[in-house]
Amino acid sequence: MNALFFDRFEIGATYRLDDSFGGMVNFAITPNLRIGYAYDHIVSDLNVTTPASHEIMLLFDLNFPKKVSRSPRYF
């Protein structure tokens, strides 16, 4: 589940049944560039080898122009 506030700040949470839970936050630096952090904590038997993970995210949007083609049947 994620929630976006003021089109700039996003916060979210995850849960996998009997496996893990986590959270994430990210902040929009510009409309096309965001930076964030995520944490995942494992509660299943896999936590012996990997108890948790940390991620730093850099998200950017590539705003390619949409290609619009017309069908030759409609003119």
Image (cartoon, helix red, strand yellow):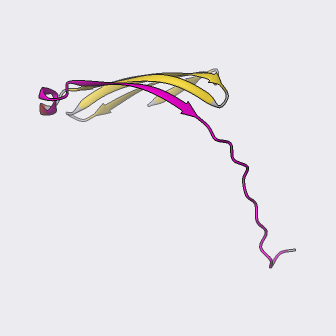
x, y percent for residue 28: 60, 23
Q: Quadrant of residue 19?
A: top left
| Residue located at (44% from left, 31% from top) | 1
Q: Quadrant of residue 24?
A: top left
| Residue located at (65% from left, 31% from top) | 32
Decide if residue 21 is on the left or right side of residue 10. Answer: left
The C terminus is located in which quarter?
bottom right
Residue numbers of the magenta segment: 46-74
x, y percent for residue 74: 83, 75
x, y percent for residue 17: 24, 35
- Of residues 74 and 30, which is closer to you in this image? 30
x, y percent for residue 20: 25, 30
Total marks placed: 0
In the rendered structure, does residue 73 fall within the stretch colored magenta? yes
Decide if residue 14 is on the left or right side of residue 63. Answer: left
- Of residues 25 and 4, which is closer to you in this image? 25
Decide if residue 70 is on the left or right side of residue 59. Answer: right
Decide if residue 28 is on the left or right side of residue 66. Answer: left
| Residue located at (54% from left, 32% from top) | 59
